[in-house]
Image (cartoon, helix red, strand yellow):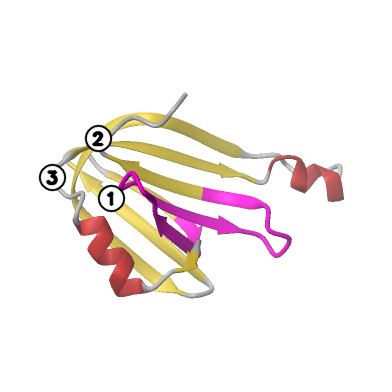
Amino acid sequence: MKKIEHNTVQRLLDQFIDKVVYLHLETTNGAYATHHNREAYNVGVFIRNAKVTFHQAKISGNEASYRVGLKTADGWIYAEGVREYELDQKGRLLLAGHDAEGRLLVTLEISETPFPS
């Protein structure tokens, strides 16, 4: 994955506007938090193959942490803490944020076809 380049990622997001797409959204501190602090509160979100259409896409922030928001007819979907991106061979946009040790903290993936189960 490459470090986010604001204008490049914005153009890639815009390519999915007004199309039916599939989202994968995942956040976790998982075992990372409780491994270091047994009193830490474990949190996470996992959504796979949610079928949506968004009418606006926006990336904001800086290289320390970006936020990506997708505006649907009924509200917003957003992921915060992304730092890297990749457009894979299948045309899927993958956005992710990892901690200093390389562990996944957040991912937002957009595809015109369903992700494998």
Which numbered circle lies on residue 70? 1
At label 3, which amino acid type do we have?
Asp
Left or right: 64 in relation to 19: right
The residue lying at 72 percent from left, 41 percent from top is 41
Q: Which image quadrant for residue 100?
A: bottom right
Name the side, left or right, on which 72 lies relative to 83: left
Residue type, numbered disc 1: Leu
Could you tell me which residue is drawn at 17 percent across and 50 percent down? 17
Q: Position of residue 95 (x, y in %)?
A: 44, 55
User: Is residue 40 shown above or below 115?
Assistant: below
Q: Is residue 35 magenta?
A: no
* Number of other residues with Cα within 10 Å of mark 2, as a class: few under 14, some 14 to 19, many 20 or more: some
Classify mark 1: helix, strand or loop. strand
Q: Is residue 37 left or right of residue 102?
A: right
Q: Position of residue 6 (x, y in %)?
A: 35, 72
Which one is in front, 101 or 89?
A: 89
**Residue shown at 29% from the left, 73% from the top:** 7
The mark nearer the N terminus, 3 or 2, is 3
**Range shown magenta:** 80-106
Q: Residue furthest front?
A: 89
Q: Residue 52's mark? A: 2
Find residue 49 and name its label. Answer: none
